Image: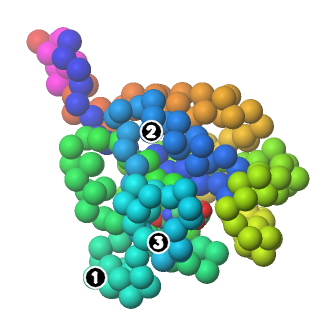
């Protein structure tokens, strides 16, 4: 039996900042050559450890608004006072080739993507084990000022209210377990009937011939 072609899927990961989503995303991309990251455009200033073009495309507000107004973003949102958006072209290219993509986006972006391409989406929401742990993780990261940390905690409450819009809610009380759960979800979703409909139909027809 030949390896079966299938449609690419879009793995949408959301969580309040500090719940461990970035680590899980990084580990997934490290371990899984069939998954590539959708690199967002943002008007947020670059953090010290970030690389332009790899973590984000850092752009001016004017450049962002031009992309948005010319229909070059699959979704966009304002988060913590900055604009973020998903460039359309790389996503189309990946889907056409049957490749899977990972989206680290907030609930506003996830909602726009569900509306646009629901059948291709696998959505995971990562919750922190407690608010104390969330604050501690944001403080340990030490890349943001105390005011920004307070603003992010407030936004976290709002983000978490949207967990019901996702297919798979996970609590990250153990990073290894949470990571294993995301990998299991991805593995099962890659086998789903609707993603392999044409290939399995051909295969079964050949069995029945
Ligand atoms: P951060 O500034 O910490 O990198 O990201 C802040 C929030 O913006 C995170 O929840 C992240 O998932 C979200 N985000 C990053 N890129 C995008 C994007 O392209 N679209 C949307 N809607 N949210 C994004």
Q: Whole-Å distance between the Cαs marked 3 and 2?
A: 21 Å
Quadrant of the image containing the N terminus: top left
User: Of all residues shown, which one is farthest toward the bottom?
Assistant: 62
Q: In the rendering, which numbered label is found on residue 29?
A: 2
The quarter of the picture where the C terminus appears is top left
Residue at label 3?
Answer: 42
Which of label 3 and label 1 is nearer to you? 3
The residue under the point 61% across, 48% down is 21
- Majority secondary structure of magenta residues: helix
| Magenta segment includes 206 | yes
Query: Between disc 1 and disc 2, whose residue precedes?
Result: 2
Residue receiving disc 1: 70
Segment colored magenta? 202-208
Under 8 Å from ligand 1: the CB of mark 3?
Answer: yes
Going 83% across and 49% down the picture, which residue do you hit? 133
- Decide which of tag 3 and tag 2 comes sooner along the chain: 2
The local crowd at label 1, few if under 14, some if 14 to 19, many if 20 or more residues have their Cα within 10 Å, is few
User: Vertically, is 4 above or below 20?
Assistant: above
Q: Kindly identify the residue that appears in the image at 73 percent across and 59 percent down.
A: 142
């Amino acid at each position: 039996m030949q390896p079966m072609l299938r449609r690419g899927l879009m793995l949408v990961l959301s969580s309040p900042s500090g719940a461990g989503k970035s680590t899980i995303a990084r580990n997934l991309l490290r371990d899984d050559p069939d998954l590539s990251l959708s690199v967002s455009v943002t008007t947020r200033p670059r953090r010290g450890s970030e690389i332009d073009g790899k973590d984000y495309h850092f752009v001016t507000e004017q450049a962002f608004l031009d992309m948005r107004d010319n229909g070059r973003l699959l979704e966009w949102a304002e988060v913590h006072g900055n604009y973020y958006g998903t460039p359309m072209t790389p996503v189309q290219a990946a889907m056409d080739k049957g490749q899977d993509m990972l989206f680290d986006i907030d609930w506003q972006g996830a909602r726009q993507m569900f509306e646009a391409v629901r059948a291709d989406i696998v959505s995971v929401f990562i919750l922190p084990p407690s608010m104390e742990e969330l604050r501690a993780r944001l403080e340990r990261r030490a890349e943001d000022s105390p005011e920004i940390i307070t603003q992010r905690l407030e936004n976290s409450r709002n983000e978490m209210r949207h967990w019901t819009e996702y297919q798979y809610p996970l609590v990250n009380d153990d990073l290894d377990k949470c990571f294993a759960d995301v990998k299991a979800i991805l593995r099962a979703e890659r086998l789903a009937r609707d993603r392999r409909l044409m290939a399995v139909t051909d295969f079964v027809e050949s069995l029945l011939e």
